[in-house]
Structure formats: C-alpha cells, structure tokens
Image (spheres, grey):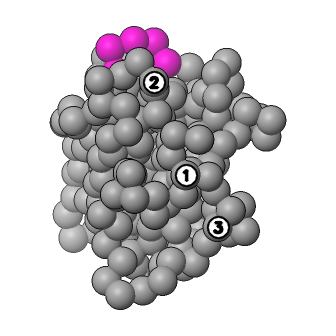
C-alpha cells in the first residue's frame, strides 16, 4: 500500500496494490495491520456505511463532536467524487484548512480522515458508490454540519457550472467557526 501524507496532519491518501489483467483486478481493500502501521496507531472501526449518489450531489461537510468524534476511512467503488477533509481541531496548526482528493472506482484511492475533522464529497460522475468505515457510532446529538460554500474555507469544489444538490440539513448548515 502506498501512503501519502497530506497538508493536514493525520489525513492520509492510501493507495492499495492493484493486481489486474484482461479478466479484471484484485485488491486488498482493508488490512487492519497495514492500516494501523500507516496511521501510526491502533484504530478500531465500529461501523461500515455505503451511499449511492447521483452527479452533482454534495454531501457534507459533516462531523461529530468529542467524545463521539468519528475517524473515517473512505473510498469509492463505482464512479468518482471530489472528497474533502476540513481541519476543525481548534488546537491544530492547520485549523480551518482543507484538503481535497479525487476518489474513484478506477484509481482505488482511500482517504483516512482522523477524528476531529469535517468531511464532505461532491459526485463528479453520473453516480458514485461511496463506502466508509467509522471509528465511532453515529450519534445525532454530537453531529454538526458546516456550509459547503463557506467563504472562510474557500473550498475549490469542481462544480463546472452546476449547482450542487444538497439535503435540507446541508442547505441549513452553519458557517465555519460558529
């Protein structure tokens, strides 16, 4: 597995070894030992989630407050997304900064987003199947949502002239820093 650190401490791009030929491909999508070595700590995942979304759907930016903050290991099995992690850890030197990466069923990349960050994605293909593992269970009382278009964050979403489709919750999300 190739591990690439990002500009935000702890956020990692993981690229598994893919073995392919004319019949298709094989990859190891998750290995606890290899993941823990890449993350530099023992991580325990408690829940797997799967969503399917159409082109232009933007989900996020979501997170959960401590003590229920979730780490997420995310990947796309079909289609493509622009995936974003935002550092909302008040004591972090990269507080308020974001990183974005294309995840697709073709490039097989995964993104590790440690607890304490907000997360969102924009579907850039006709549809996308998005899978993620979490380190904490979903707790609605700990959840927060940030505006996807907050000018302070200035995320460079690859909208290409489209207006993103948002849930009611995401359309009503708060600005960063509130």
Q: What residue is pinned by disc 2?
A: 90
* In the rendered image, the vertical position of residue 121 relative to residue 39, given as above or below: below
Q: What residue is pinned by disc 1?
A: 175
Of discs 3 and 1, which sits in the foreground? Answer: 1
- The residues bearing labels 1 and 2 have C-alpha atoms spaced at a distance of 15 Å
Disc on the earlier residue, 1 or 2: 2
Query: Disc 3 on helix, strand or loop?
Result: helix
Q: How many circles with numbers are drawn on the protein?
A: 3
In the rendered image, the residue lying farthest to the top is: 41
Frontmost residue, 127 versus 68: 68
Which label was assigned to residue 55?
none
Q: What residue is pinned by disc 3?
A: 171
* Left or right of residue 153, residue 68 in this image: right
- The residues bearing labels 3 and 1 have C-alpha atoms spaced at a distance of 11 Å
Q: Main secondary structure of the magenta part?
A: loop
Q: What percent of the width, then of the height, locates residue 72? A: 51, 37
* Left or right of residue 61, residue 7 in this image: left
* In the rendered image, the vertical position of residue 94 relative to residue 151, given as above or below: above
Disc on the earlier residue, 3 or 2: 2
Estimate how packed mark 3 is, as few (under 14), some (14 to 19) or many (20 or more) residues with alpha carbons within 10 Å.
some
The magenta stretch is 39-43
* In the rendered image, the vertical position of residue 137 relative to residue 147, given as above or below: above
Q: What percent of the width, then of the height, locates residue 153? A: 38, 51
């Amino acid at each position: 597995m190739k591990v690439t650190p990002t500009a935000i401490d702890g956020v990692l791009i993981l690229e598994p070894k893919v073995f392919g030929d004319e019949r298709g491909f094989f990859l190891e999508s998750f290995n606890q030992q290899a993941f823990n070595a890449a993350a530099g700590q023992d991580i325990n995942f408690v829940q797997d989630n799967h969503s399917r979304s159409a082109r232009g759907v933007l989900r996020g930016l979501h997170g959960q407050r401590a003590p229920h903050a979730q780490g997420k290991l995310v990947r796309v099995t079909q289609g493509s997304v622009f995936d974003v992690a935002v550092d909302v850890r008040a004591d972090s030197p990269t507080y308020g900064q974001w990183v974005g990466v294309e995840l697709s069923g073709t490039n097989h990349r995964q993104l590790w987003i440690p607890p304490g960050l907000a997360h969102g994605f924009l579907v850039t293909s006709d549809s996308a199947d998005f899978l993620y593992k979490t380190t904490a269970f979903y707790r609605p009382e700990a959840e927060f949502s940030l505006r996807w278009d907050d000018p302070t964050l200035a995320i460079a979403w690859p909208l290409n002239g489209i207006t993103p489709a948002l849930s009611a919750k995401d359309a009503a999300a708060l600005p960063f820093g509130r």
